[in-house]
Amino acid sequence: MYRQGDILIVPVAEDAVPASVRALPPAARDGRGRMVLALGEATGHAHALTAPGELRRDPNPLAPDHLWLPSGGRLAHEEHAAISLPKGWYRVIRQREYVPGAVRVVAD
Amino acid sequence: METVDRASLLLSWQSAAFATGAADRPTAEAGIAAAYTAAGLPVPERFVWVGSPAAGAVAAAALGGHADALRAAGLDVPDLPPAGASVRDAVRTRPWEEVRAQAHAALGTDGWPRAWADTGALLWDPVNSVVTRVRAAIGGLAEPVETVLRAATLDAVLGQQDAPWLAQFDALGLLEPLRGLAGAARSAGWWWPYENLVIVAERPVELHRDEPGRLHRGDGPAVAWPDGFALHAWRGMPIPADFVRTLDGLTPERIRAEENAELRRVMLEIYGYDRYLAESNATPLHRDETGVLWRIDLPDDEPVVMVEVVNSTPEPDGTSRTYYLRVPPATRTAREGVAWTFGVDETDYRPQAQT
């Protein structure tokens, strides 16, 4: 698994990817052709990849998204060193913080 | 639909929702007029511009027959010509319901929540939390007329804060029937449509949010409108207007003595967890290669348990930023705390690369 700031990328075996995830449509890329895993609200800084592949966003905002990289890729962010990801499937998990009575997601 | 650049679309509606600065009055009035026309109604004769949603709610409540009560409660009530009945249902609710039904029919029971999760839901929480705060603050303007004022806020078309739904319909290519409402949303604040006139509120002159998007400011109002109506907040928590200024010379003793748990949390954050820990001679609960686990006990509240995490990528000056994340109070080890923040098991949390 790989951590870039507030994002954890966990490899998933190909046959362990749920059918419900495979059935999701791939999320659209942004204007620069990037798959944006998470976007900081205020800074606009993004955890993003330009590699071939697909991002499957779970309809439940608290559930992890899935990322498929058929030939690997380089995860970039304005404030963190890039991370090279081998080819394969990944779960993309956003860091959260405990709030009494609620849980809030961290965004850097 | 797949070719829509969703991130750009979302960002543009997000900036509309939180836009500050003078309304674009001609565009807003043209949009509102188009919404009347689309609803089969004659274009209203007058647009009455007000300096905040609070002033708009007071005007709307006055039109609803509560002018005397509002004046008796000490509020400034504008003199308005006869407005006729509210036409909010025809201008906003009905066309919006039609488009939503159309989207629902096209996408089905699975597709609709998926589409909403992908677009509208991402804007809903941050926008709705502001709307909820504004409504509460308007209700709080004068206690004897609280119910009347709150009801008036529910009669408003939310203008710029209709952005989550408009972004949703935009992403689905269904915005055309709502073109007028969308034009008004990109140009003005809340508005109240009547047969003969429209009350339209200006946008805020300033609006400050923290990284996760919550209203937040320490040295002034988090949101303020041109007529002086304003909200104060610290990381989303409502605070009294002068609260932060009264915290000069704050001490750990004073923090412990504060009886309101929410305000005490604000005091702790402003004072700084690290400083509080240092000055109260706290010792870490646990330390390992993932970080340090700290605990602060508070009277009549659950303890604050936090992991101190090091950002692995150094800052430009070569230092490494540490940050504190609150974790459930029962957490026992630093690794368990960090693993919890990512929703994974303590034993499974082994990153092979961190930046």
Image: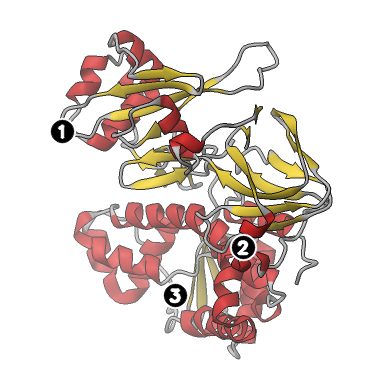
Q: What is the count of numbered marks?
A: 3
Foreground of the two, B24 or B265: B265
Gap between marks 3 and 1 measured at Cα: 54 Å
Q: Secondary structure at mark 1?
A: loop
Mark identifier at residue B276: none
> Taking the image as drawn, is residue A8 in sight?
yes
Quadrant in the picture for residue B186 = bottom right
Q: Which residue is painted at 66% across and 18% down in the image?
A: B315
Kind of residue sitting beneath label 3: Pro
Give a yes or no on whether discs 3 and 2 share a subunit.
yes
Q: Could you tell which of marks 3 and 2 lies nearer the N-terminus? A: 3
> Taking the image as drawn, is residue B51 in sight?
no
Mark identifier at residue B81: 3
Image quadrant where one finds the N terminus of chain B = bottom right
Callout 1 crowding tier (Cα within 10 Å): few <14, some 14–19, many ≥20: few
Do the residues bearing badges 1 and 2 touch, measured as CB atoms within 8 Å?
Answer: no
Tell me residue B274's x, y (percent): 40, 16
Tell me residue A33's x, y (percent): 83, 52
Q: Could you tell which of marks 3 and 1 lies nearer the N-terminus? A: 3
Q: Secondary structure at mark 3?
A: loop
Q: Could you tell which of marks 1 and 2 lies nearer the N-terminus? A: 2
Callout 3 crowding tier (Cα within 10 Å): few <14, some 14–19, many ≥20: few
Kind of residue sitting beneath label 2: Asp
Quadrant in the picture for residue B264 = top left
Q: Which residue is mark 1?
A: B300
Foreground of the two, A69 or B32: A69
**Location of residue B11 with respect to A42 vertically, above or below:** below
**Comparing marks 3 and 2, which lies closer to the viewer?**
2
Kind of residue sitting beneath label 1: Asp
**Location of residue B302 with respect to B192 vertically, above or below:** above
Tell me residue A89's x, y (percent): 70, 51
Q: Which residue is mark 2?
A: B118
